[in-house]
Image (cartoon, helix red, strand yellow):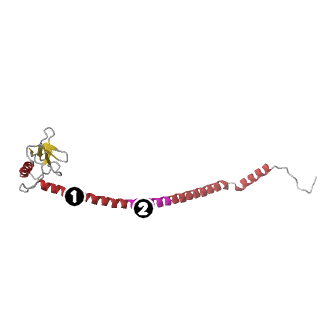
Amino acid sequence: MNSTQSPVYRTSVEQKRHAQEVAKRQRMGNQMPRLREMLREKYRKRIIETRNRCTDAQREIQLSELREILRLELSELEKDVELEELILEELLSDVNEWYALGEKNLETLYAEPDEQQKEVLCPVCQIKNLRHHKGAFICECGIRFEHSANMEQLQILLQQQIASHELQCTQALRFFIEPASGQLYDMCGSCDYFSSV
């Protein structure tokens, strides 16, 4: 049977695909593993480059945010420094006022007896004046002590105590009320001077 027509083969689609893959493998042969390695290397490089670009972009964003935060912090710090300087000036003026008041009080406490003073400065707080009430001396600072002297005599006694101490020491006397007896005492921490008024 000779026929002029080409023979018809009954092959399925799966058989054709299989045949194409076999032919492709034979053509590629030993080159296939090298091609895979080349493709892997290319993709690996692309992934690394993309990752680096993303990381650099994130760094740029983070750096710009960090710069902005630093600018804000510096501006707030400058405001804080200005505020701190104002507070320091106020505190220094308060300290100067307190120092001037303390000096004034010390001057009145250490005044000479020939200067006539109608009021006696409290020897304990050295700020307020003493009041004499029914044999007791009272100050607004809260101290109270009893003494037989009147105001003028108490002032003279205090000045005598201070003068006798100044002959031996340059430090200021400290006056205090002894809680058990309610009497006025004076002492010096540097020369161990101790006496009752």
- The residue wearing badge 1 is 97
Q: Residue at x 25, y 59 (%)?
A: 93
Quarter occupied by the C terminus? top left
Mark 2 surroundings within 10 Å by alpha-carbon count, few (fewer than 14), some (14 through 19), many (20 or more)? few
Q: Is residue 65 magenta?
A: yes
Distance from disc 2 to disc 1, alpha carbons, whole Å, reads 39 Å
Residue at the image position 49 percent from the left and 61 percent from the top: 60
Give percent across and percent down for residue 175. Answer: 13, 47
Please provide percent x and percent y for residue 150.
8, 47
Residue kind at label 1, given as amino acid type: Glu
Mark 2 or 1, which is nearer the eye? 1
Main SS category, magenta section: helix
* 107 relative to 88 in the view: left or right: left
Residue 27 is left or right of residue 152, and the answer is right
Residue 28 is marked as none
Q: Position of residue 135 (x, y in %)?
A: 11, 43
Q: Which residues are magenta?
A: 59-76
Q: Is residue 193 above or below residue 84?
A: above
Q: Position of residue 109 (x, y in %)?
A: 12, 53
Q: Which residue is mark 2?
A: 71
Magenta-drawn stretch contains 58? no
What amino acid is labelled 2 in the image?
A: Arg
Label 2 vs 1, first from the N-terminus:
2
Residue under the point 45% across and 61% down: 68
